């Protein structure tokens, strides 16, 4: 199946309209049931109490343990611990594995408990909020948890909405209600909701509210925040309901003293709670690789255990054959049975090789590195008081492996602070640049008492045309801007304050205000303006809403003279399609739009028409019928809108400036030097996007820009040379690499044609029907999928060879599709960055999602993995924190595996000298503490603090970022080198000690088994610490403390677990009394330990020195270094090299 088919669109599915709500009748709703579990049924309508906590006092322990043992590693260790309870195969003390597992379960359990306590407190706070519910004939003070579906609720100014309500009435004129939706979509601007006129007029007091018995029939609860379809049946009439009449849970009442609402959805049925589903878990490459490596280790453990058990079986047979007098000891069992038991004994003994503590240490390193991102003052944006925020704590290392960045334009690359710069009216362009003519002065707007004093305009001809008021088109142009919008207005300190859903709309209404056409107020049915000082009130007949498909909005009004007029504004493509034939100034306006786009200005086209009364009356009936439909209402309304929005008269176009954010060109330049490809996905015009591309250094003059015609030519040429199904299915397109720099510029319409849906692939199948005539026995659907996959792969292959890609006029769904196609066919790590609701799909689809807190609210931030205030901070997030995190995690994993193998592989060599009996070499407490205390802190400090170069150097030389993209620091090769290195160290430690202890006896009796074990254990621990110390490149006080604390803890804990007092209390648990003291006070043993450490570390030191002498810097880096050096040759030679240039020591 092609990639776009896997991206679902819930909005395209028609819901079931079986949700009935009867006002003021709780008993009515109790009769409805729904299947809950098996044959049990529960209430269909939820109460309003929410319960987000996972546990209670009784269920915490069993449920948390159940969840933790869903992890395969924990389940495996529990299995091994249970095996230890069998005396025949028990080889380790019970605490050797139980203690680390208990620590792991306790730490995670405490973390889960703390999180759940916070959820309990949050639930209690929310459910206990006060509210007023209509019970009987009066409103009573209750709590949110007491609300039920069908209740009438009274809300006051600044109250939060407790459930999804149908607005019935308010204290505002025409029952308007102003709400703030910051907790839902992050937008802080005010929105208005409006009650039905019938409820506004009828429900005027508490008695009328109590007598209200209307029935609402609507869709079942869904997660679609901005859609609601239903009808109100009351007094024999049906009234249309939509999202504009709903108050959603989580909104806050603003600028409205009192409002009343009918509860439609409560509790977990409310839309905001329906959107609180599980977020898809994102996992990094290193995390996935680590899980595979743990499986490899486990398989190795099974194989080694099996081989050692077989060897034990053969040894038993040989022993019985040569020493028949010992047969009595084996008379009750066979060699096969004893080998079987020995296999499980070795499984227990070697289970410590599977690193249990790796997972919890992994999580801790991720958490601390996320804090470093949060604490970075270089990414703190003081104007908004916003620091960088790592919303996900498990993706930091993947920030160092990004290969593709997909960026929105408006609000991400640009500031999204709109300024009205130019316009075209009747084919004449008005407005000049500030720097184009030094003699120009900004026009004075002091004559207008409503002017806000912020608009700077440099063309007096426009002001003259407006104030003369002789040109009808000029008048209609500015009248449209003052009328055709959804802006709300309030008065503060004698000044009008506009609240708009987008900065574009606010800029246009504010421009009209400054030029004398002032939007003053709106009610449910009217809009009032001041036009050059004359106040006029228009009757609103219909609002034809904007959406991403229509790309326009219109308002149908009746002016004070009684004439019906339609005003429309939207994208040039949709407006020009709906102009009347022979519309004047169309060509001149098109040229002006092209000029505006070249100047990177955002454009809109304006049009209007006068509507005949008879046509309006006929159209109004169609509009009403469509608005009360339950099924397919949106499609029916679109068809009705189309009937009205045609034969328009072109008025002109507007041009708004949206400046680049600070540092964007330099950031993109650095990212490109770091081998990161940047694609821009925007809904703007192609010309605007291309010019922004040049402005931000994404495009350059030496690039060959491929547009749709050239792309079709390249892909068609490839099709002709690969016109067979086998080539499509197996080989895939392999487009030749172009020698020149290329950039790709495509539009959303082009993507629709090139990447059609599966049902639209029939034309391709017919075109190449020769496939079926040649005898290929593939189903038609398979062929369509093959063709769709071929087109997807061919496009991605071509685009990936380009230096830059710009996709214009794309929808939010197309943005997500492009990201998914690149991930599917290029197998790369992707990052998406945006600031608006239209970027959410893209952010969720990418491996890493970054949200910009911009002018469009916080929707993108709420769905992101990382939040930034400016695009420029992306360079530090990736090139510094991402690179450091990848380096730290990689070195941590490498040395964690190395230190585990270096100490625990000795158990295998010891088996050859213990008759393959699975007898442990080490003390049980050494095994229990090795990964928790003795060697944990040096490796942990490396995972938290390691740097191979400073932040400044990371930004100076972004070329070093490529080590993460190529997975150079940790991969299968590095793992097996660590395995070989650890194995070699274990062999040296074991056989050096064995050679030294061979037939040797001192005055302290140092040839005993316990002294031998202490010698090998001490050699292993000191070797591991020395090896890690040699590889730490960034020493701090914490690093020194971590290394030294390992030796101190080893000495202290060994003293505690090996003293005679505790041995006398539990001799079976503390079996090594004074073993360390006896062995390590002997100079001979200390020399043996020193010899083992030297033999282990000398090869590593020699290899490091050899690599340092023979290492050659990369050519590109050499040029950069010579370019940036400050006259000192010494500085260049001292510049640090990344870890990726040094091969791991053998």
Image (cartoon, rainbow, N blue to C red):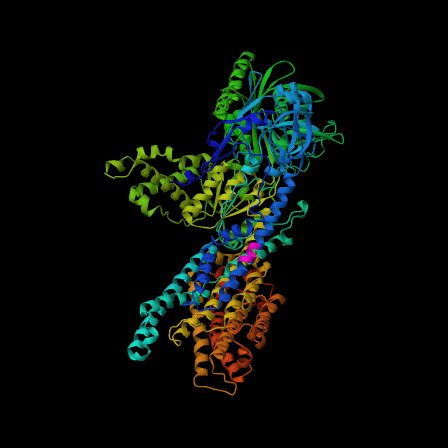
Assign the N terminus to one quadrant of the image: top left
The x, y position of residue 789, in whole percent, is 37, 41
Which of these two is toward me, 354 or 640? Answer: 354
In the rendered structure, the answer to whether residue 556 lies left or right of residue 704 reads: right
Q: Quarter-wise, where is residue 1029 in the image?
A: bottom right
The x, y position of residue 268, in whole percent, is 55, 37
Residue that sits furthest to the right in the current view: 493
Which of these two is toward me, 318 or 1007? Answer: 318
The x, y position of residue 1119, in whole percent, is 52, 60
Q: Residue at x 32, y 47 (%)?
A: 730
Q: Looking at the image, is 945 positioned above or below residue 826?
A: below
Residue that sits furthest to the top in the current view: 614
Q: Is residue 108 inside the magenta stretch? A: yes
In the rendered structure, the answer to whether residue 492 lies left or right of residue 1037 reads: right
Which of these two is toward me, 523 or 680? Answer: 523
Find the magenta span and give its range: 105-109
Q: Is residue 579 visible?
A: no
In the rendered structure, the answer to whether residue 1001 lies left or right of residue 344 reads: right
Assign the C terminus to one quadrant of the image: bottom left
Q: Is residue 434 inside the magenta stretch? A: no
């Amino acid at each position: 199946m092609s990639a776009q088919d896997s991206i679902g669109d819930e909005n395209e599915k028609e819901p079931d309209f079986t949700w009935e709500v009867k006002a003021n009748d709780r008993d009515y709703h109790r009769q409805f049931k729904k299947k809950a579990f098996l044959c049990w049924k529960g209430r269909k309508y939820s109460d309003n109490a929410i319960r987000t906590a996972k546990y209670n006092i009784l269920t915490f322990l069993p449920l948390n343990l159940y969840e933790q043992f869903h992890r395969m590693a924990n389940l495996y260790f529990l299995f091994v611990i249970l095996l230890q309870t069998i005396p025949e195969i028990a080889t380790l003390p019970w605490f050797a594995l139980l203690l680390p597992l208990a620590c792991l379960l306790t730490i995670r359990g405490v973390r889960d408990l703390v999180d759940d306590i916070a959820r309990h407190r949050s639930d209690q706070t929310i459910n206990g909020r006060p509210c007023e519910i209509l019970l009987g004939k009066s409103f009573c003070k209750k709590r949110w948890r007491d609300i039920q579906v069908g209740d009438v609720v009274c809300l006051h100014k600044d109250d939060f909405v407790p459930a999804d309500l149908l607005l019935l009435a308010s204290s505002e004129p025409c029952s308007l209600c102003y709400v703030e939706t910051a907790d839902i979509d992050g937008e802080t601007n005010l929105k208005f909701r409006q009650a039905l006129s019938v409820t506004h007029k009828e429900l005027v007091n508490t008695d009328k509210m109590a007598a209200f018995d209307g029935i609402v029939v609507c869709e079942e609860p869904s997660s679609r925040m901005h859609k609601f379809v239903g009808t109100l049946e009351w007094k024999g009439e049906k009234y249309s309901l939509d999202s504009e009449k709903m108050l959603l849970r989580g909104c806050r009442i603003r600028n409205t003293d009192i409002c009343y609402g009918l509860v439609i959805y409560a509790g977990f049925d409310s839309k905001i709670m329906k959107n609180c589903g599980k977020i898809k878990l994102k996992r990094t490459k290193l995390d996935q690789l680590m899980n595979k490596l743990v499986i490899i280790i486990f398989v190795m453990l099974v194989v080694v255990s099996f081989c050692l058990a077989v060897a034990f079986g053969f040894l038993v047979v040989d022993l019985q054959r040569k020493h028949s007098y010992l047969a009595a000891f084996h008379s009750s069992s066979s060699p096969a049975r004893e080998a079987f038991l020995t296999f499980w004994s070795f499984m227990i003994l070697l289970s410590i090789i599977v690193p249990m503590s790796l997972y919890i240490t992994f999580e801790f390193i991720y958490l601390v590195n996320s804090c470093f991102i949060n604490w970075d003052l270089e990414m703190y944006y003081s104007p908004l008081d916003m620091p960088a925020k790592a919303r996900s704590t498990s993706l930091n290392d993947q920030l160092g492996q990004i290969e593709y960045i997909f960026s929105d334009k408006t609000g991400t690359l640009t500031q999204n602070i709109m300024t009205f710069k130019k316009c075209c009216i009747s084919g004449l362009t008005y407005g000049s640049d500030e720097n184009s003519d030094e003699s120009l002065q900004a026009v004075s707007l002091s004559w207008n008492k409503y002017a806000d004093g912020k608009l700077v305009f440099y063309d007096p001809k426009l002001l003259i045309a407006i104030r003369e008021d002789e040109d009808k088109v000029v008048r209609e142009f500015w009248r449209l801007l003052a009328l055709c919008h959804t802006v709300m207005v309030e008065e503060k300190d004698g000044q009008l304050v506009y609240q708009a859903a987008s900065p574009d709309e606010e800029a246009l209404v504010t421009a009209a205000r400054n030029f004398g056409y002032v939007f003053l107020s709106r009610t449910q049915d009217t809009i009032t303006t001041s036009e050059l000082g004359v106040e006029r009130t228009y009757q609103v007949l219909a609002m034809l809403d904007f959406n991403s498909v229509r790309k326009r909005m219109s308002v149908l009004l009746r002016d004070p003279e009684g004439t019906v007029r339609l005003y429309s504004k939207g994208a040039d493509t949709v407006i020009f399609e709906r102009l009347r034939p022979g519309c004047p100034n169309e060509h001149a306006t098109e040229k002006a739009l092209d000029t505006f786009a070249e100047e990177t200005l955002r454009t809109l086209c304006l049009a209007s028409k006068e509507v005949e009364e008879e046509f309006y009356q006929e159209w109004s009936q169609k509009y009403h019928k469509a608005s009360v439909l339950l099924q397919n209402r949106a499609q029916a309304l679109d068809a009705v809108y189309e009937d009205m929005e045609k034969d328009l008269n072109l008025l002109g176009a507007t041009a708004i400036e949206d400046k680049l954010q600070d540092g964007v060109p330099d950031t993109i330049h650095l990212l490109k030097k770091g081998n990161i490809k940047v694609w821009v996905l925007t809904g703007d015009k192609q010309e605007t996007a291309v010019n922004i591309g040049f402005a931000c250094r994404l495009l350059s003059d030496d690039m060959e820009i491929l547009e749709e015609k050239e792309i079709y030519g390249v892909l068609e040429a490839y099709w002709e040379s690969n016109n067979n199904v086998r080539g499509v299915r197996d080989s895939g397109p392999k487009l030749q690499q172009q020698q020149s720099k290329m950039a790709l510029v495509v539009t959303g319409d082009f993507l629709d044609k090139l990447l059609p849906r599966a049902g639209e692939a029939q034309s391709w199948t017919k075109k190449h029907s020769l496939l079926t005539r040649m005898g290929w026995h593939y189903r038609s659907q398979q062929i369509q999928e093959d063709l769709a996959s071929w087109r997807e792969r061919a496009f991605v292959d071509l685009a990936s060879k380009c230096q830059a890609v710009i996709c214009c006029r794309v929808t939010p769904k197309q943005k997500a599709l492009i990201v998914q196609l690149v991930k599917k066919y290029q197998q790369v790590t992707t990052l998406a960055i945006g600031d608006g609701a239209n970027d959410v799909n893209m952010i969720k689809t990418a491996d890493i999602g970054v949200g910009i807190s911009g002018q469009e609210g916080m929707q993108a931030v709420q769905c992101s993995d990382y939040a930034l205030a400016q695009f420029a901070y992306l360079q530090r997030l990736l090139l510094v924190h991402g690179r450091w995190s990848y380096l730290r995690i990689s070195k941590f994993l490498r040395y964690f595996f190395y230190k585990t193998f270096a100490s625990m592989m000795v158990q295998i060599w010891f088996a050859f000298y213990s008759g393959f009996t699975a007898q442990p070499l080490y003390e049980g407490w050494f095994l229990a503490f090795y990964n928790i205390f003795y060697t944990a802190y040096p490796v942990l400090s490396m995972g938290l603090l390691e740097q191979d170069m400073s932040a400044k150097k990371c930004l100076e030389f972004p070329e070093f970022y490529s080590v993460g993209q190529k997975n150079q620091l940790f991969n299968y090769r590095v793992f097996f080198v660590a395995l070989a290195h650890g194995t070699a160290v274990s062999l040296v430690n074991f056989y050096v000690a064995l050679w030294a202890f061979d037939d040797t006896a001192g005055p302290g009796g140092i040839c005993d088994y316990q002294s031998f074990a202490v010698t090998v254990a001490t050699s292993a621990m000191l070797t591991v610490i020395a090896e890690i110390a040699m590889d730490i490149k960034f020493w701090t006080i914490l690093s020194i403390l971590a290394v030294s604390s390992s030796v101190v803890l080893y000495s202290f804990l060994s003293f505690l677990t090996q003293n005679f007092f505790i041995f006398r209390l539990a001799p079976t648990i503390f079996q090594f009394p004074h073993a360390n003291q006896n062995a390590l006070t002997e100079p001979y043993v200390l020399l043996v330990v020193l010899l083992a450490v030297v033999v282990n570390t000398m090869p590593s030191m020699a290899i490091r020195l050899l690599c340092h002498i023979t290492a050659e810097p990369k050519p590109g880096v050499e040029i950069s270094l010579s370019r940036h050096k400050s006259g000192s040759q010494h500085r260049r030679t001292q510049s640090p090299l990344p870890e990726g240039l040094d091969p791991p020591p053998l």
